[in-house]
Image: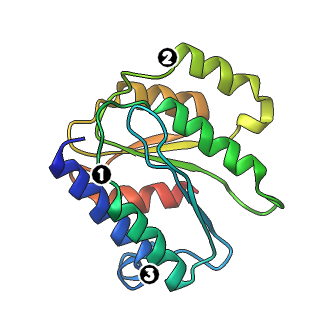
Amino acid sequence: MREASEDDLKGAMRMLLDQGTASRFLLQTSSRDVTIVIPFSSKPIDQWEVKGNADDDLSRLLAQINAQQAEGGTDIFTPVLQARDAIRKLPDLEGYSPAIILMTDGKSESGMSLDHFRQVWQSAGRAGDVPIYSITFGSADDTQLKQLAELSSGRVFDGRSDLIRAFRQARGYN
């Protein structure tokens, strides 16, 4: 990830997780939301979860994100599967509309292939029915992202030209 893209991504997360800023753009979380963040490069790096919208919890999550440094390589497929598995482990998904929001500035070039991802995703049956909404940054190649969207009934949103619009569109689908 290039430095400018990393700064853009961290700025985007600040916009979402700082509830004062998020409320200006109608992007704030609710007390019932569960936010799971999986930073990745050529593999998933960590996984953090916040239940609800308590300012202290969201601030700690933002601090963890800001402490992350970009590493080389990109594997978008493994963290997406990890996110789906984390969603499937949540209790009482009745009444929720779970979704994966993938934010990337690249193209998957390491880890599993798209074909392998497709097989794993489809083998989950109905449990795989989580839409993948991708938001592009920097020089993201949306070819793979469009294939993920097609596979999951998701969408791709261009965060390069208007990040706020991209987030609002993704939330509108969810």
* Relative side of 56 to 164, left or right: right
Q: Nearer the viewer, residue 30 or 172?
A: 30
Q: CA distance from mark 1 to mark 2?
A: 25 Å
Q: CA distance from mark 1 to mark 3?
A: 24 Å
SS type, badge 2: loop
Residue at point 28% right, 40% down?
A: 105
* Labels in figure, total: 3
Residue bearing mark 2: 113
**Residue 102 image offset from top left, x and y in percent:** 45, 45
Within-10-Å neighbours for mark 3: few <14, some 14–19, many 20+: many
Residue at point 39% right, 61% down?
A: 65
Which image quarter holds the N terminus? top left
Q: Is residue 164 visible?
A: no
Under mark 1, the amino acid is Gln
Under mark 2, the amino acid is Ser
Residue bearing mark 3: 19
Residue bearing mark 1: 69
Which image quarter holds the C terminus? bottom right
Please determine whether, in this image, residue 107 is positioned above or below residue 9.
above
SS type, badge 1: loop
**Residue 145 image offset from top left, x and y in percent:** 42, 32
Q: Mark 1 and mark 3 in contact? Answer it, CB < 8 Å.
A: no
SS type, badge 3: helix
Residue at point 65% right, 42% down?
A: 84
Q: CA distance from mark 3 to mark 2?
A: 37 Å
Q: Mark 1 and mark 2 in contact? Answer it, CB < 8 Å.
A: no
Q: Is residue 52 visible?
A: yes
Please determine whether, in this image, residue 1 is positioned above or below residue 165.
above
Q: Mark 3 and mark 2 in contact? Answer it, CB < 8 Å.
A: no
Q: Nearer the viewer, residue 105 or 56?
A: 56
Q: Nearer the viewer, mark 3 or mark 2?
A: 2
